[in-house]
Every structure is written in C-alpha cells, then in structure tokens.
Amino acid sequence: MEMEKETALVEAILYLESDPIDEAAISRISGLSKETVTTALENLSARYSEPACGLELSRIGGGIMISAKREYWDNLKERYGKKSEGKISRAAMETLAIVAYTQPVTRPEIEKIRGVSADNMIRLLLEKGLVREAGKKDIPGRPVMYGTTKEFLKIFGLSSISELPKLGESDIEKFELEGEKY
C-alpha cells in the first residue's frame, strides 16, 4: 500500500477523535495536504472493506469517524451503546421526528402538528444535543426555529438530513402546516 505512514497517521487521528472530523481538520492536525488525507482515507476505506475487519469509516454530518461495522452493532450495542441516557420517550421521539422532517420549525408549529405542548420535549432534546436553535422566524413575535444537530446525525448514522427515510403519503399529511408540505 502506498503512503503507509500517512494512512496510519490519519487512522490514529480518527481513532483519537470522539466526534466526526472533516478532512480539513485532519489535514491541519496531521500537517498533511488535503490530497494526501483524501488518499489516506481511500486507503483506510479499502482496508476496512475487507470481510475480516470489524471497522468502517462513517461519514456523519460532513465529518468522518471510525465506527464498528453496522452488521456487528446488534452484538455490540448492549455493552457499548448509550443505554438509558440514549433512550428518549415516545413523545420526545415524535417531537424529534417533526423537527427532523420539517426543519426549521417553531415550537407553535410543532405543537400544531402534535396537538399538545412541546416545551418540555424541546427542552429535553436541546439538553441531549439532538436539536438546536436555528434562528428566528420572520413573523410577528419572531419565534425561535429549531433544527437537528450533528449529534442527531451521529446517533442515527446519517451523513446528512437528506438520508432520512422518505415519508409515505399518509405520513406526509401529518407533517403539513397551513397548506405547506414537507
């Protein structure tokens, strides 16, 4: 393999980082050019694609990280998954789904879709780092708009929000607001 030392350095950086990191940051940390980092990542991806390897490169929210291959996660999640702190209630999951599929969305819009107050669920999701304030809506009162975070993408194994499962026709109707479709 070409560039063994450079590839090993990039692998070490990915191993030591607990969150996804982008290629520019890897380049800055390693002192390697972006082209060299890209080649090293390709080398790692090829190495990790071997059946005897239990790791893979995951692209999450514009960053890259080393993770266990998805095919092994069922065997590993009991010990290595975030147990109780990773669990959220059905109400919180419903609120998170609304934010994910309709973002940016305001609290009153979430409440209109859910039919109940969303204050506590939004607060919980903010505390867990799954949603963030995404600005203010340009309407009277300027309510805060919410969107998902990189942590949301990381937990759900998505590289971007566009990878969310597509909604069926009956589900789309649940997310409609005043004639707006999502």
Image (spheres, helix red, strand yellow):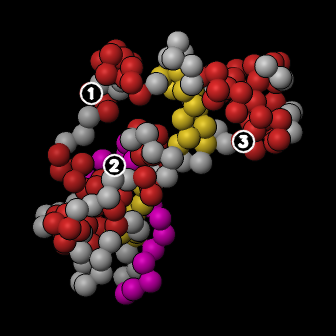
Front residue of this view, candidates 17 and 76:
76
Label 1 Cα crowd, 10 Å radius (few <14 / some 14-19 / many 20+) = few
Position in image of residue 83 (x %, y %)? 29, 24
Q: Quadrant of residue 175?
A: bottom left
Label drawn at residue 23: 3
Kind of element beneath mark 2: helix
Read off the residue under disc 1: 84
Q: Earlier in the sequence, mark 2 or mark 1?
A: 1
Q: Which residues are magenta?
A: 120-140
The three-letter amino acid code for the residue at tag 2 is: Leu
Q: Residue at x 22, y 62 (%)?
A: 168
Residue 125 visible to an observer of this rendering: yes
Kind of element beneath mark 1: helix
Front residue of this view, candidates 8 and 2:
2
The three-letter amino acid code for the residue at tag 1 is: Ser
Position of 167 relative to 69 (above/below)? below
Read off the residue under disc 2: 125
Position of 144 relative to 43 (above/below)? below
Q: Residue at x 32, y 58 (%)?
A: 166
> Does residue 44 appear left or right of residue 83 in this picture?
right
Q: Residue at x 56, y 40 (%)?
A: 59
Which quarter shows the N terminus? top right
Kind of element beneath mark 3: helix
